[in-house]
Image (spheres, helix red, strand yellow):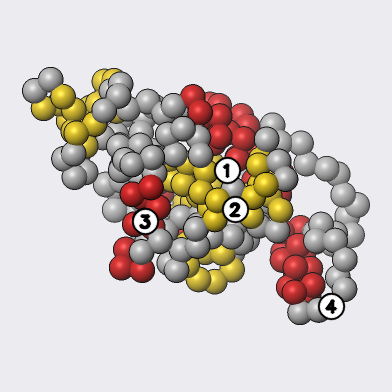
Amino acid sequence: MYKVVRDRLHKGKTPVEYRETPNKGGRIVPRYIVLHDTCGYGHGRGSIAWLTNPASRASAHLVIAEDGTITQLADFDVRTWHAGPSSWDGLSGLNGYSIGIEMANPGLCYKRGRSFVRASGGTKVTGDVVHHPKTQWHPDGYWQPYSKQQMAALLSVIKALGEAYPTIEEVIGHHQIDTRKWKVDPSPLMPWDEVHAVLQGVAMPVEPAVSAVPRAEVRQTQARLNGLGYAAGDEDGK
């Protein structure tokens, strides 16, 4: 369904909506995909407004709304500010090594009378909310399931990113990499078995061993040469 063309996400032949964030800087070769919850509502629109506001000093590459609509905020080879103080597998500062995806979701909820409110902000939550016991990273609490449309979009995007960037090794959650140990997103309702299976199932083409340079870096160099007017040919990483 989705594919990556020159570091932009396309649905078929049509690019997804692009709302450029000013909160970015520097080139990356992605090794990870980091999943987040927006902890906000408004079909993701409120979160998009926040992540494109210079005052927020926060951003991500993609926002996936409850209905599966995807908005891209930065090219995938550009650093965004989504991970904060973070470390994983011996690396620190995961902004420099990862693509950040925000799932529109209220995050941890509290019960207030017959209703539920977001732990972040205290606004009322509409729709189904379910209880989930404590995990290694999450407190015992109430959470809203991701919609079928959201999950279908996320899994398709992970597949597209895995095919476009052979350097991507793993999909991880913000709660796993947060060095402050207080992030609880994404929620414990994230189906990690499906998420990991999609990336592991990406069949990478076998290329002749002509270079030890990662294909993603070769693609970036080809794109820059073409942008400067040199005829570098297809940006295929070869």
Residue at the image position 23 percent from the left and 27 percent from the top: 141
Residue with the mark numbered 4: 230
- Ranked by sequence position, the earlier of labels 1 and 4 is 1
> Alpha-carbon neighbours of circle 4 within 10 Å: few (<14), some, or many (≥20)?
few
Q: Quadrant of residue 78?
A: bottom right
Residue with the mark numbered 2: 31
- Taking depth in this image into account, of 44 and 79 the one nearest to the observer is 44
- Ranked by sequence position, the earlier of labels 1 and 2 is 2
> Alpha-carbon neighbours of circle 1 within 10 Å: few (<14), some, or many (≥20)?
some
Picture layout, residue 3 above or below residue 95 = above
Residue with the mark numbered 1: 170
Q: Which mark, by number, is residue 49?
A: 3
- The Cα atoms of the two marked residues, 1 and 3, are separated by 28 Å
> Alpha-carbon neighbours of circle 3 within 10 Å: few (<14), some, or many (≥20)?
few
Do callouts 1 and 3 mark residues in contact (Cβ within 8 Å)?
Answer: no
- The Cα atoms of the two marked residues, 2 and 3, are separated by 27 Å
Secondary structure beneath dot 1 equals strand
- The Cα atoms of the two marked residues, 1 and 4, are separated by 34 Å
- Ranked by sequence position, the earlier of labels 2 and 3 is 2
Do callouts 1 and 2 mark residues in contact (Cβ within 8 Å)?
Answer: yes
Secondary structure beneath dot 2 equals loop
Amino acid carrying mark 4 in the image: Tyr
Q: Where the C terminus falls, by quadrant?
A: bottom right
- Ranked by sequence position, the earlier of labels 4 and 3 is 3
Picture layout, residue 144 above or below residue 228 = above
Can residue 92 be seen in this snapshot?
Answer: no
Amino acid carrying mark 3 in the image: Ala
Residue at the image position 56 percent from the left and 34 percent from the top: 153
> Alpha-carbon neighbours of circle 2 within 10 Å: few (<14), some, or many (≥20)?
some
- The Cα atoms of the two marked residues, 4 and 3, are separated by 37 Å
